[in-house]
């Protein structure tokens, strides 16, 4: 069962009224003991709650990361339930309220879901939360029975003392457990004892998705709610020049028209159709503003210019330039990776009810605290008076890491006192995205007479998301995400120089996109590695193997993918096979892609073979699903996708002009997992990053032509 918490305030209020419950906050031991003492004085309820809540209604797991379709609710539940000695059918799930003091992602330094960090950051803390709760309940039962805790065992939420035949449920012992001291040391299970972790568990959110009971943000319905849709200036920096309010207000069902700082207009109606027709009737004329001259060509020309200068040094090993200058074989190239839209299946939406004394916000967001702060800033309300009701999301791919849509909704509706659901049309969603940056990469390499790499340089030019989003992480002029996968690679390298040139394109907002840095850097590096292999007449897989003498995990996935794909066998005319290798998000992945190109020059994707080592695997089915979905998402973008600009406005407006892979175009995807005892790595973005390089290399294999600009489907036409 999946429910949504509303806010920290209402959550604490609700738990304070609960009779007989254990609430556990996984914090530093001293703080935990102090708060436990306060809770003992006040009530049998142990307050505050972080991850585990146990009362007469059962066991509820409060999950710090949001479900965006990646399966994290199930994996997180598996980790906590493992240490609680529960089965998954015994737990209920709640989304964590905005509270960065408890739910901060320690990699992202924010209460955020992104960057393939969820399992990596929760691997220890969620297990510790479950183990601590179990220890406290066993200790309470042992005290009640006057036996030693070591003589008790737990099975499916039932504490048993076999010697005396006594047993008690978690729910019944929870009031007494609230009076137990929080353990300073929390021993965890040895992996050999795992019952859930590593098994193919069925996803907990599937039944509600199948029967339609799961409520996404776009499904929210509130009493007395009205509906709205909006139009935003097509050029960033533009504003309303004129509009026909009378025509819109004359339509049946239109209730009101609101504006935000003159760059956005929304029509409120009794239903969505009335709002949409009212918006059309406004017949808005826009003043284009200062960015009307911007085109894709002007952006790229400027990037070419600035990339010729020196960048901030991201990595320097020996003198790479000198090594290349004296090398027997020298290579250089420029690669282009375009702007990309997120375009999740569920377009942006937000339901608000703003009152004089507070506000409720129903939304699917990856950043609940940022969303809460944004609404508070717009309305002037105290932050704690803004309740965020977070919902599962119908895709996000990083788009909902930005709070702009929630902030804009609050700006539009700040003077409206009834609930309003604001839904963006697909056209508004796609043309006012925060796009994956355009990257312009200059790369060089030198190889000796034996075909061994002796030096490599890589200059990345592009927008810095960190400089805007988290300035503290932008140090020394280097955006660590922009160079992720470029400065450091899986390979043996003695002489390397990697630098970064920050360039913010005029009139374009940029942000995280499923993988961001690695999605473009793996494409560049792995394509260029292939260029090195072919320039020295070496097999691409053998060439990579020879550079993996110090990276056994990378070598293992490369060997597995090569074996399973049949690498080395002769291919028929028109067929191509490409390989890509990466170390990103804490995981190792190799991808071999088979394609066919006929006389019509159409690329047909035949077979995708993925080998992944993500350390300890919580749910192998989740890993498989993420590899399948991720690589298809990445291939779709590498084949077809780019966002372009004409006269400052985005050219692509819907899926007819922003093409996605069709079912009949998808390759067969095979996923092979290497299981070991290493710490868990991320998988949500790994498959996406592995797509473009393998595709570019497969095209070269089939045609002998090297293409360095994405997307690739149109290059052969």
Image (cartoon, rainbow, N blue to C red):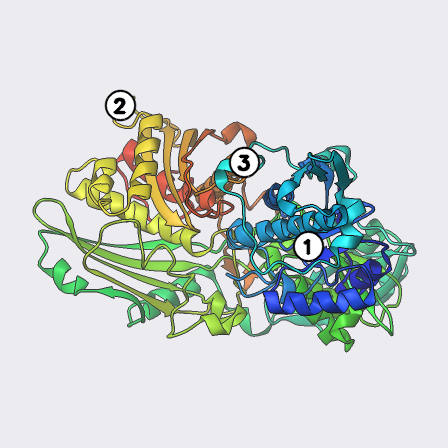
Look at 44% across and 51% down and name the residue there. Answer: 585
Q: Pick whichever, 684 or 458, lies toward us.
A: 684
Q: Where does label 2 land, which residue?
A: 569
Closer to the eye: label 3 or 2: 3
Give SS at disc 3.
helix
Q: Is residue 550 above or below residue 499?
A: above
- Separation (CA) of disc 3 from disc 1: 24 Å
Query: Image quarter for residue 362?
Result: bottom right
Look at 42% across and 39% down and name the residue there. Answer: 713
Look at 77% across and 33% down and name the residue there. Answer: 211
Instruction: Quadrant for the C terminus, please.
Output: top left
Q: Where does label 3 land, which residue?
A: 625
Evaluate whether residue 460 shows in this view: yes
For label 3, count other residues whose C-alpha is less than 10 Å away and answer few (under 14), some (14-19) or many (20+). some
- In the image, residue 42 lies at what x, y percent? 82, 67
In the rendering, which numbered label is found on residue 608?
none
Q: Do the numbered discs 3 and 2 sit on residues whose CB atoms are within 8 Å?
A: no
Instruction: Quadrant for the N terminus, please.
Output: top right
Look at 28% across and 34% down and name the residue there. Answer: 701
For label 2, count other residues whose C-alpha is less than 10 Å away and answer few (under 14), some (14-19) or many (20+). few
Q: Is residue 689 left or right of residue 18?
A: left
Closer to the eye: label 2 or 1: 2
Q: Is residue 42 above or below residue 199?
A: below
- In the image, residue 519 lies at what x, y percent? 43, 50
Q: Where does label 1 land, which residue?
A: 348
Give SS at disc 1.
loop
Mark 2 or mark 1: whose residue is earlier in sequence = 1
Q: Pick whichever, 400 or 145, lies toward us.
A: 145
Closer to the eye: label 3 or 1: 3
- In the image, residue 350 lies at what x, y percent? 74, 58
């Amino acid at each position: 069962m999946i429910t949504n918490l509303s806010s920290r305030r209402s959550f604490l209020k609700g738990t304070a009224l609960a009779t007989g419950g254990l609430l556990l906050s996984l914090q530093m031991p001293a703080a935990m003991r102090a708060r436990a003492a306060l809770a003992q004085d006040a009530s049998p309820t142990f307050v505050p709650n972080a991850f585990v809540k146990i009362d007469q209604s059962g066991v509820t797991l409060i999950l710090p990361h949001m479900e965006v379709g990646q399966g994290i609710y199930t994996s997180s539940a598996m980790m906590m339930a493992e240490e609680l000695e529960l089965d998954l059918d015994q737990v209920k799930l709640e989304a964590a309220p905005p509270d960065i003091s408890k739910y901060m992602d320690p990699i992202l330094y924010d209460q955020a879901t992104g960057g393939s960090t969820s399992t990596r950051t929760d691997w220890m803390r969620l297990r510790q939360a479950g183990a601590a709760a179990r220890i406290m309940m066993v200790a309470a039962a042992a005290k009640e029975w006057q036996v030693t805790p070591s003589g008790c065992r737990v099975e499916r939420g039932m504490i048993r003392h076999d010697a005396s035949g006594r047993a008690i449920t978690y729910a019944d012992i929870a009031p007494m457990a609230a009076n137990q001291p929080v353990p300073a040391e929390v021993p965890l299970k040895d992996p050999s004892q795992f019952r859930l972790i590593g098994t193919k568990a069925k996803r907990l959110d599937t039944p509600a998705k199948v029967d339609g009971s799961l409520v996404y943000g776009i499904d929210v319905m509130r009493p007395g709610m009205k509906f709205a849709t909006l139009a935003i200036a097509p050029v960033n920096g533009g504003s309303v020049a004129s509009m026909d309010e009378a025509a819109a207000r004359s339509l049946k069902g239109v209730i009101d028209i609101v504006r935000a700082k003159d760059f956005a207009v929304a029509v409120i109606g009794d239903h969505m159709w009335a709002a949409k027709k009212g918006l059309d009737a406004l017949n808005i004329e826009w003043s284009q503003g200062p960015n009307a001259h911007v085109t894709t060509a002007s952006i790229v020309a400027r990037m070419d210019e600035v990339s010729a200068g020196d960048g901030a040094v991201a990595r320097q090993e020996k003198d790479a330039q000198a090594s290349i200058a004296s090398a027997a074989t020298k290579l250089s190239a420029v690669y282009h990776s375009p702007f990309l839209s997120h375009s999740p299946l569920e377009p942006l939406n937000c339901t608000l009810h703003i009152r004089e004394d507070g506000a409720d916000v129903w939304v699917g967001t990856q950043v609940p605290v940022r969303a809460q702060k944004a609404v508070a800033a717009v309305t002037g309300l105290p932050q704690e008076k803004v309740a965020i009701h977070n919902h599962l999301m119908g895709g996000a791919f990083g788009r909902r890491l930005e709070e702009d849509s929630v902030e804009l909704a609050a700006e539009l509706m700040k003077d409206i006192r009834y609930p309003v659901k604001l839904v963006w049309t697909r056209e508004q969603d796609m043309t006012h995205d925060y796009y994956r940056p355009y990257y312009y990469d200059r790369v060089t390499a030198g190889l000796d007479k034996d075909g061994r790499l002796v030096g490599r340089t890589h200059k990345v030019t592009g927008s810095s998301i960190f400089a805007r989003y988290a300035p503290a992480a932008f140090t020394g002029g280097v955006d660590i995400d922009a160079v992720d996968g470029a400065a450091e690679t899986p390979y043996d390298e003695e002489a390397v120089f990697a630098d970064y040139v920050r360039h913010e394109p005029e009139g374009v907002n940029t942000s995280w996109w499923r993988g961001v840095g690695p999605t473009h850097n793996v494409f560049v590096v792995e394509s260029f590695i292939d260029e090195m292999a072919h320039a020295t007449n070496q097999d691409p897989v053998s060439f990579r193997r020879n550079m993996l003498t110090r990276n056994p995990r990378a070598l293992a996935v490369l060997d597995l993918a090569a074996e399973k794909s049949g690498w080395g066998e002769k291919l028929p005319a028109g067929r191509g096979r490409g390989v890509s290798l990466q170390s990103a998000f804490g995981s190792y992945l190799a991808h071999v892609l088979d394609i066919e190109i006929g006389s019509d020059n159409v690329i047909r994707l035949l077979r995708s073979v993925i080998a992944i080592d993500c350390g300890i695997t919580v749910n192998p089915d989740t890993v498989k699903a993420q590899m399948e979905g991720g690589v298809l998402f990445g291939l779709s973008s590498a084949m077809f996708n780019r966002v372009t600009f004409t006269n400052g406005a985005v050219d692509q407006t819907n899926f007819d002009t922003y093409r996605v892979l069709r079912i009949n175009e998808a390759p067969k995807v095979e996923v092979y997992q290497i299981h070991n005892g290493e710490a868990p790595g991320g998988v949500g973005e790994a498959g996406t990053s592995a797509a473009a390089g393998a595709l570019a290399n497969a095209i070269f294999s089939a045609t002998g032509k090297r293409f360095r600009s994405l997307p690739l489907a149109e290059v052969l036409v």
